[in-house]
Image (tube, rainbow, N blue to C red):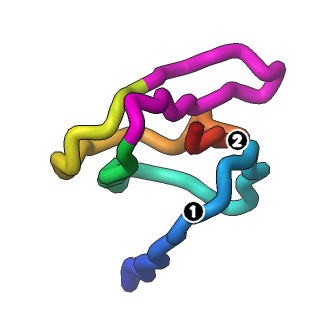
Amino acid sequence: MSHKWRVFNLYQCNKYGLSYWHGGGFHVDSQTGGVRSYFYGKNGNVLNFFTPDAAKRDDNRDPVWSIRNC
């Protein structure tokens, strides 16, 4: 089985619905201005939130249905 990677550049402040976003991966948040980003579950519940620090963070995307980058 081969693994395919995709990069999502989320430049606009928005809530993005996700499709076929499964398994492990990582994210990097290098925004400015003290914003918070959120991962949401199927029912809109907050699964995780983080603030920018430009570090590479591992995550499990299986329960994530949407993300807000601001």
> In the picture, residue 70 is in which quadrant?
top right
Front residue of this view, candidates 6 and 54: 54
Figure check: 41 above or below 53: above
Tell me what residue is drawn at x 55 percent, y 54 percent: 22
Residue type pointed to by label 2:
Ser
Question: Is 35 part of what is drawn in magenta?
Answer: yes
Where does the image place residue 43, in percent across and percent down from the top left? 82, 20
Q: Give the range drawn in magenta.
A: 33-49
Residue at far left of view: 55
Q: Name the residue under label 1.
A: 10
Figure check: 57 above or below 47: below
Where does the image place residue 57, in percent across and percent down from the top left? 24, 43
Q: Mark 2 points at which residue?
A: 66
Figure check: 33 above or below 41: below
Q: Does dot 2 land on a helix, a strand or a loop?
A: strand
Tell me what residue is drawn at x 57 percent, y 62 percent: 10
Residue type pointed to by label 1:
Leu
Q: Left or right: 55 with respect to 61?
A: left
Question: Is 61 part of what is drawn in magenta?
Answer: no
Tell me what residue is drawn at x 35 percent, y 40 percent: 59
Where does the image place residue 33, in percent across and percent down from the top left? 40, 37
Front: mark 2 or 1: 1
Where does the image place residue 46, in percent across and percent down from the top left? 62, 17
Dot 2: few (<14), some (14–19), or many (≥20) neighbours within 10 Å? many
The residues tagged by marks 2 and 1 sit, at their Cα atoms, a distance apart of: 12 Å
Q: Left or right: 18 with respect to 8?
A: right
> In the picture, residue 51 is in which quadrant?
top left
